[in-house]
Image: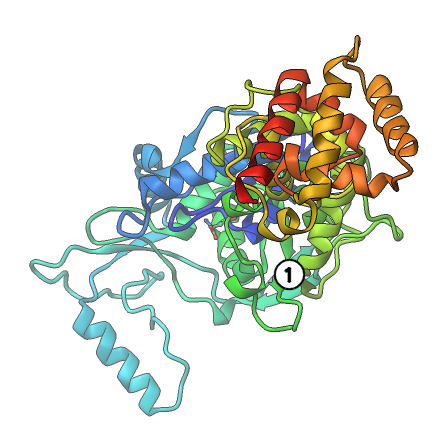
Amino acid sequence: MTVVTRFAPSPTGYLHIGGARTALFSYLYAKRHGGKFLLRIEDTDRERSTQEAVDAIFEGMAWLNLKSDFAEIYQTQRFDRYKEVIGQMLAAGSAYYCYCSKEELDAMRAEQMARKEKPRYDGRWRPEPGKTLPPIPDGVQPVVRFKNPLEGQVVLNDLIKGEIAFDNAELDDLIIARGDGTPTYNFCVVVDDWDMGITHVIRGDDHVNNTPRQINILKALGATPPAYAHVSMILGADGAKLSKRHGALSVTEYRAMGFMPEALLNYLVRLGWSHGDQELFTREEMIEKFDFDHVSASPARFDMEKAWWVNHQYLKIADPAIVAPEFDWHLRRLGVDPANGPDLKRVIEQQRERCRSLVEMAEKSKFFYAELDGYNEKDAAKHLNADGAAVLEALAALLEALPDWTAEALHVAVNGFAEGRGLGLGKVAQPLRVACCGMAVSPPIDQTLFLLGRERTLARLKAAVSYVRSKS
Ligand code: GLU
């Protein structure tokens, strides 16, 4: 059996991290078993679905590199198929027309409530042997209901939650097509999972109560129900329902905050799943190790600090070539042209120890690619003074005469200069930093000057000297 899993978001909002985790689990499970993963857009709710949300889902999935093994699938393009199956069920007697008007259903409900009963459809249009159905009223567009078994149980062996039994007596005859003929949500899911050969349905546990209904419909269609894994929800660090304040943001917002996609996935996989106490996983390791035996049935807690920690660990060890395109994106967001400066990979290598986000890295690296838009006020006050200017002027002459602009040559020159003048390295390096970077923090000074390049360095040293002079 080839494992086929799916991620089936409704495009009524952005792809948030809870959804991304569900997608990741589905993806990993399929890949782990050499199977296939598909993305299905459940857009039958025309009022709540938007193109913007569809685009955001595709954008988020592409950024996370959770690729579907199939072409794009939209439920709205499958209406003919749903109609066909409804027709078959009506013909086979596993579904029936119900002509109850809204008023009748409301009255039914009110009576049941008055009798302190659970409101439910009373089966008045449900055909049974020997039963006479009411006369068909004029002008009512009937809905189609599924003929749910009246007795027995549906036993779900959930891969995460274990066995859950549902009494059929508790399940209504579900409406599978509305009066206007459009199929309803649970029904579309069933037909899709069946047609697409889904072997494992992995989804949020807010869907647990839909599962027995879906299993019954699948059985009525003669299909073997897939296995189910209902993933617990994610709570905030304080144990409350995850909200924006806790980090319930869209995947795109995580990108804008400076996360690497692989790091975000790494953080998400650990939300509910564990492999011993290992925290950091490559994608290959996640695929190799992911299983449902180690997915917790209780809710996971989202911890933003830990997410940042994972991102930082990732940045520190990642191949700079993989980080570079994302870093490029962040520099452009700052209005900087990444082509106008050193190789991004070299800058990443120099910056990653001190930056846990790519936003931070871009802000601290902007000076490599764009002219300075002034100096950090405090740093300038401290380092760009008469002493600093004297140091910078002498250094400018020294560096201008360097035959090779290499990190080694710069190291020797700057250190030699400080020693020669009997100055601590800070007294030399800090004015240099403020002059070249606009602020007193940067990678090691030799690397900084090397990456900044000869022309830019010399021009900035001279500009800093003029700046000091113009003030005095
Ligand atoms: N479309 C549903 C949702 O976005 C998911 C349905 C499913 O996975 O079965 O919540």
Residue lying farthest top?
A: 403
Q: Write the residue at 51% across / 32% down.
A: 196
- Give the position of the N terminus as an image quadrant: top right
89 vs 277: above or below: above
Residue lying farthest left?
A: 138
Q: Write the residue at 64% across / 61% down.
A: 232
Is residue 143 toward the left or the right of residue 399 in the image?
left
The residue indicated by pointer 1 is 232
Query: Residue 457 versus residue 116: which sits nearer the camera?
Result: 457
Is residue 179 toward the left or the right of residue 343 in the image?
left
Secondary structure, mark 1, is loop
Q: Residue 368 location in percent, x, y?
A: 62, 27
Query: Residue 243 versus residue 132: which sits nearer the camera?
Result: 243
Question: In which image quadrant can residue 369 be found?
Answer: top right
The colour scheme used here is rainbow
105 vs 230: above or below: below
At label 1, the amino acid type is Ser
165 vs 7: above or below: below
Q: Residue 220 location in percent, x, y?
A: 48, 48
